[in-house]
Image (cartoon, grey):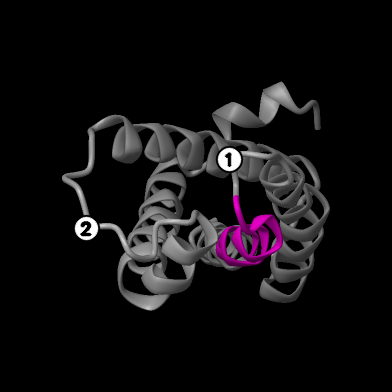
Amino acid sequence: MNMLNVLASINWLSVLTAFAAYFILGALWFTALFSKPYLLSLGKANEIPQKTAPIFIIGPAICTLVITIAAAILMYALNISNIGDALAFGLVIGLGFLFANTVNIAINPNIPRPLLYGLISGMYHLAGISLACTVLVLMK
């Protein structure tokens, strides 16, 4: 099946559900589960929390939606139809693209603790894409 031809066969409710799960995981990950280590990785552990600007919510939401749509297209094109294959796919995409790219972005002079940042954010994307892929295959 052609990659773009799969668009018509995708269950878009599953994409929205997978996106919501991935995005909500991010909200929990960076505020409740790992907020202190995340702030430490950014060199902001001792700063008073500021009100979050809309771009810091809307931007990640759009990116997470794009990631989820891309995963759905690939999963349908590759005919991934069981949880084991969905998790394997999530692991490959999560480690090979999302985690590696997050660490690569973190390694710059503006992030005081790039490896800690890469670990926290990269693990979020690995967990998030695995969750999203599971939702996508369960609702296929």
Q: Which residue matches tag 1?
A: 67
Q: Magenta segment range?
A: 112-124
- Considering every residue shown, the one lying at the far top of the view is 4
At 34% from the left edge and 68% from the top edge, which residue is drawn?
A: 28
* Distance between mark 2 and mark 1 Cα atoms: 32 Å
In which quadrant of the rendered image does the C terminus lie? bottom right
- Amino acid under disc 2: Ile
- Amino acid under disc 1: Ile
Location of residue 36 in the rendering, given as x and y in whole percent from the top left corner: 39, 72
Is 116 placed left or right of 41 in the picture? right
Q: Which residue matches tag 2?
A: 48
Q: Earlier in the sequence, mark 2 or mark 1?
A: 2
- Foreground label between 2 and 1: 2
Location of residue 57 in the rendering, given as x and y in whole percent from the top left corner: 30, 40
**Above or below: residue 14 compared with residue 56:** below
Location of residue 41 in the rendering, given as x and y in whole percent from the top left corner: 54, 61
